[in-house]
Image: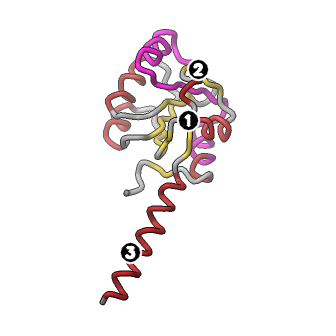
């Protein structure tokens, strides 16, 4: 029995290590997505635990988790408010979208980094997932 428990502990440690490896910094996200920083260039070392791609803010509230990066094509200020409520670490606008000025001001006031990439949401999510970032749907 003790042999079995020690095997479980070893698997748990390997799993925890793999979870730690799944994290990435905003600087790494920027590089992977060929993104530009709109707000928060000084926050590039913030860690991202997982990614969430959505244009429906109700889905973001229902399925996202603390520490996630939001990938979206929506550019209005509601995106910042939703990300704040969901305790997300940053927003990346996809498909070459540029956020409205009100959105930028709101994010600046909340120290919420904003990035923008030319790639589609599908490709952005795929690149990050391939690079090891967990999806919000994955259990802890």
Q: Secondary structure at mark 1?
A: loop
Residues 13 and 53: in front is 13
Residues at discs 3 and 1 in contact (Cβ within 8 Å): no
Name the residue: 62% across, 40% down: 28
Dot 1 or dot 2: first in sequence order is: 2
Provide the residue designation for mark 3. 9
Does residue 117 show up magenta in the picture? Answer: yes
Query: What is the span of residues highlighted in magenta in the rendered image?
Result: 98-127
Give how far apart the Cα atoms at labels 3 and 1 are: 31 Å
Q: Position of residue 4 (x, y in %)?
A: 36, 86
Give how far apart the Cα atoms at labels 3 and 2 are: 43 Å
- 3 vs 2, front mark: 3
Provide the residue designation for mark 2. 38
Residues at discs 3 and 2 in contact (Cβ within 8 Å): no
Quarter placement of the C terminus: bottom left
Provide the residue designation for mark 1. 45
Residues at discs 1 and 2 in contact (Cβ within 8 Å): no
Quarter placement of the N terminus: bottom left
Q: Badge 2: few (under 14), some or many (20 or more) residues near its Cα, within 10 Å?
A: some
Name the residue: 57% across, 24% down: 42
Q: Badge 1: few (under 14), some or many (20 or more) residues near its Cα, within 10 Å?
A: few
Q: Position of residue 55 (x, y in %)?
A: 45, 32
Name the residue: 58% across, 27% down: 115
Q: Position of residue 7 (x, y in %)?
A: 41, 81
Q: Secondary structure at mark 3?
A: helix
- 1 vs 2, front mark: 1
Q: Position of residue 25 (x, y in %)?
A: 56, 40
Dot 3 or dot 1: first in sequence order is: 3
Residues 109 and 34: in front is 109
Give how far apart the Cα atoms at labels 1 and 2 are: 15 Å
């Amino acid at each position: 029995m003790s042999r079995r428990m020690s095997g479980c502990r070893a698997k748990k440690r390997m799993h925890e290590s793999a979870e730690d490896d799944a994290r990435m910094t905003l600087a790494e996200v920027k590089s992977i997505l060929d993104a530009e920083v709109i707000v928060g260039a000084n926050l590039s070392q913030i860690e991202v635990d997982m990614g969430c791609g959505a244009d429906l803010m109700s889905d973001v509230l229902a399925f996202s988790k603390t520490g996630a990066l939001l990938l979206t094509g929506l550019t209005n200020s509601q995106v910042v408010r939703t990300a704040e409520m969901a305790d997300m670490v940053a927003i990346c606008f996809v498909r070459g979208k540029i956020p409205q000025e009100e959105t930028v001001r709101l994010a600046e006031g909340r120290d919420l980094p904003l990035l923008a990439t030319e790639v589609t949401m599908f490709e952005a999510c795929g690149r990050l997932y391939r690079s090891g970032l967990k999806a919000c749907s994955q259990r802890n």
